[in-house]
Image (cartoon, rainbow, N blue to C red):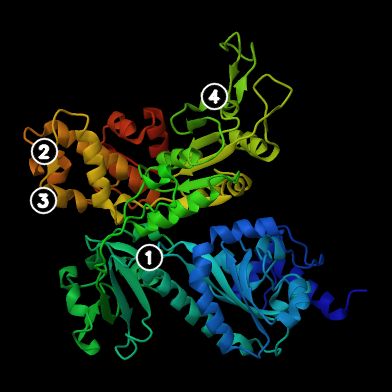
């Protein structure tokens, strides 16, 4: 028989879901409604927490390895602060899976049963209203105390959680502090919320400092007394004084200055420091410890005056990232860039596994080259088969991927055709621009990944295949999922491991890469060419919206134009001699665009809105460019209203 207090709780949830008012916190009430209306959960159906299998947990931990390392010290420090009070600390990834935790081991059985344990799935769709799941849904800090929980199973718990964002402003994880029992008053957890927020600021600050040791970092605080002790937020600046990264508090601060939604990090990254602050970035050295903290003031464009501390880039001698421990194909991809080194080491660890890979990065960052290097680093035989989902006309993708039997359709070859998936058997299938794959084919691809078999068009007998799938995209797949343009289940099949290539303007080994490409290009000619200092400086400080692909084009052009053995400014493409060549220059009064749209817009602008030239540069066909422009709302300058 269900206890009276549980019946009362279930009835309250049902009343709120039906539209009745309540005195509970707004975030809790909105979550209750989502649980019923969106997730289809029944408050009367109680279920214990779900712990994912060990192999699945291992995959989640591998994907968040760097974050776990950065956050671990903070978790241990916070646990010392609350030792003896019965709290458990959980670090959950962006999918709601607990990837690290600290709790009293004498209560392991009780904690595991309650879901306060490693591997617990706290996603709102599964667990109902809870601190981790509701924080995932809203990206806001929240206290879910006792009867705030949707599922009555969790009523004894009190849980407080807040989001952790990465250096690019993306939602990365949730830090949660929970207890099996607590005082009845919700106010008893307000201090826990302050502690969680405080340690999240430290985690984000540590992540920023560790990620940008070769760039300027500006720490900001409303108080000069606490500037050097506990700065409220910080931003990282690249060599052109543009925003390269930030903590979440800084992200919110910057967004206020230019009146944009702080969640739209693409509207903030890449913009100049003086877009947000009334301060010339050439004077950053004046904000160092050489001056008293109370004299280091800067004014925001649309807000308060703050105190600042500028940390200069570390001037350590460059060390090659291409360690001998890396396979040769991977070692060839980077020089002395720390982000590339870490990514390549991870690639080396998983090269021989069958785990699916998702490669992320802007257009032209070298995703296919990375995929080929990973394939070449494997010890198994088999072909590398590349498919550009954006370049293939939609009508041909299915037959190209899955193949067909003789007579399957009008125009089919008499002997039929083996599809690309079959051609990749025992090897690697590389699916570039996976975000452009039509939904209907996404469902068929999901079956291939699940069943490891392919059904050709016109066939009724599936053919077994043994393939390693590597997908790549420059698009935000999470945004496509939200708009129904990409299947969530396929996304989770593809991202067994995620590798992210940094944009060219953020790479510390730019000169190494430039010299390598110069040597390769000039080796094809009859003479050896070199860059003069001014041309090198101009290339180094360009924003490179087309990344490595655009750099190769620029070098090819300069080599062709050079009439001596030294490439100077006049030999560079005309674009490099214009007053403004930044990625953020959107000519013709274009409206504000998403990050993806901004990248395409700038490629088009760099090619003077010549669709054929832009398509050739991007490696896709003209119809795909037109389709992307329509979907992203990009209008050429000559068609915009005056």
Which residue is identified by label 1? Answer: 211
Q: CA distance from mark 3 to mark 2?
A: 13 Å
Q: CA distance from mark 1 to mark 4?
A: 42 Å
Which residue is identified by label 2? Answer: 571
Q: CA distance from mark 4 to mark 2?
A: 42 Å
Q: Label 4 near label 1: C-beta < 8 Å?
A: no
Q: What residue is rendered at 48% in x and 32% in y?
A: 386
Q: CA distance from mark 3 to mark 4?
A: 48 Å
Q: CA distance from mark 1 to mark 2?
A: 35 Å
* Circle on res. 280: none
Instruction: Indicate the position of residue 323 as horizontal and vertical percent values.
Output: 39, 54
Instruction: Indicate the position of residue 634 as horizontal and vertical percent values.
Output: 35, 42
Which residue is identified by label 3? Answer: 533
- For the C terminus, the quadrant is top left
Q: Mark 3 falls on what kind of element?
A: helix
* Circle on res. 400: 4
Nearest the viewer among 74 and 259 is 74
Q: What residue is rendered at 67% in x and 19% in y?
A: 458
Nearest the viewer among 619 and 376 is 376
Q: Quadrant of residue 75?
A: bottom right
Mark with earlier residue (4, 2): 4
Mark with earlier residue (1, 2): 1
Q: Is residue 365 left or right of residue 387?
A: left
Residue 637 in view of the camera: no
User: Number of callouts in the render?
Assistant: 4
* Front of the two marks 4 and 2: 2
Instruction: Indicate the position of residue 324 as horizontal and vertical percent values.
Output: 40, 51
- For the N terminus, the quadrant is bottom right
Instruction: Indicate the position of residue 34 as horizontal and vertical percent values.
Output: 65, 62
């Amino acid at each position: 028989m269900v206890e009276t207090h549980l019946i009362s709780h279930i009835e309250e949830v049902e009343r709120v879901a039906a539209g009745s008012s309540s005195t509970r916190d707004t975030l809790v009430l909105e979550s209750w409604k989502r649980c019923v209306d969106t997730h289809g959960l029944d408050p009367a159906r109680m279920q214990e927490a779900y712990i994912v299998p060990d192999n699945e947990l291992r995959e989640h931990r591998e994907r968040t390895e760097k974050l776990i390392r950065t956050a671990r010290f903070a978790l241990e420090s916070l646990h010392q602060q609350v030792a003896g009070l019965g709290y458990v600390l959980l670090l959950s990834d962006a999918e709601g899976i607990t990837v690290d935790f600290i709790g009293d081991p004498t209560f392991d059985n009780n904690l595991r049963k309650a879901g306060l344990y490693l591997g617990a799935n706290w996603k709102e769709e599964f667990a109902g209203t809870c601190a981790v799941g509701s924080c995932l849904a809203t990206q806001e800090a929240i206290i879910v105390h006792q009867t705030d929980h949707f599922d009555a199973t969790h009523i004894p718990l009190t849980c407080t959680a807040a989001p952790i964002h990465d250096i690019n402003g993306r939602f990365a994880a949730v830090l949660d502090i929970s207890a099996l029992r607590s005082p009845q008053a919700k106010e008893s957890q307000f201090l826990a919320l302050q502690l969680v927020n405080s340690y999240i600021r430290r985690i984000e600050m540590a992540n920023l400092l560790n990620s940008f040791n070769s760039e300027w970092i500006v720490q900001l605080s409303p108080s000069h007394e606490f500037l050097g002790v506990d700065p409220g937020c910080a931003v990282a600046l690249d060599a052109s004084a543009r925003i390269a990264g930030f903590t979440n508090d800084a992200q919110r601060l910057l967004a206020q200055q230019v009146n944009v939604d702080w969640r739209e990090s693409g509207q903030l990254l890449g913009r100049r420091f003086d877009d947000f602050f009334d301060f010339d970035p050439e004077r950053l050295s004046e904000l160092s410890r050489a001056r008293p903290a109370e004299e280091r003031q800067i004014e925001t464009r649309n807000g308060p005056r703050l105190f600042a501390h500028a940390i200069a880039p570390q001037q350590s001698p460059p060390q090659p990232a291409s360690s001998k421990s890396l396979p040769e194909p991977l070692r060839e991809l980077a020089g002395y860039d720390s982000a590339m080194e870490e990514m390549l080491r991870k690639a080396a660890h998983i090269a021989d596994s069958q785990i699916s890979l998702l490669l992320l990065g802007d257009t032209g960052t070298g995703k296919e080259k990375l995929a080929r290097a990973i394939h070449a680093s494997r010890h198994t035989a088999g072909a590398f088969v590349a498919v550009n989902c954006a370049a293939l006309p939609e009508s041909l993708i299915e037959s190209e991927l899955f193949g067909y039997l003789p007579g399957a359709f009008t125009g089919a070859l008499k002997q039929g055709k083996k599809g690309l998936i079959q051609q990749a058997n025992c090897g690697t299938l590389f699916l570039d621009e996976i975000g452009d794959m039509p939904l209907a084919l996404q469902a068929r691809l999901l079956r291939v990944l699940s069943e490891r078999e392919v059904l050709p068009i016109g066939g009724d007998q599936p053919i077994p295949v043994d393939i390693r799938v590597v997908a790549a995209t420059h698009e935000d797949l999470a945004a496509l999922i939200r708009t129904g343009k990409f299947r969530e289940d396929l996304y989770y099949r593809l991202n067994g491991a995620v590798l992210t290539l940094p944009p060219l303007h953020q790479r510390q080994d730019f000169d190494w890469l430039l010299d390598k490409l110069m040597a390769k290009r000039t080796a094809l000619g009859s003479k050896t060419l070199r860059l003069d200092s001014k041309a090198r400086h101009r290339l180094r400080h360009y924003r490179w919206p087309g990344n490595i692909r655009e750099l190769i084009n620029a070098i090819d052009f300069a080599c062709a134009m050079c009439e001596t053995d030294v490439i100077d400014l006049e030999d560079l493409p005309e674009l490099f001699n214009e007053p403004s060549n930044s990625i953020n220059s959107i000519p013709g009064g274009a409206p504000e665009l998403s990050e993806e749209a901004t990248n395409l817009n700038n490629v088009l602008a760099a090619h003077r809105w010549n669709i054929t030239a832009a398509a050739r540069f991007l490696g896709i066909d003209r119809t795909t460019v037109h389709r992307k422009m329509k979907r992203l709302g990009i209008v050429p300058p000559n068609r915009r209203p005056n």
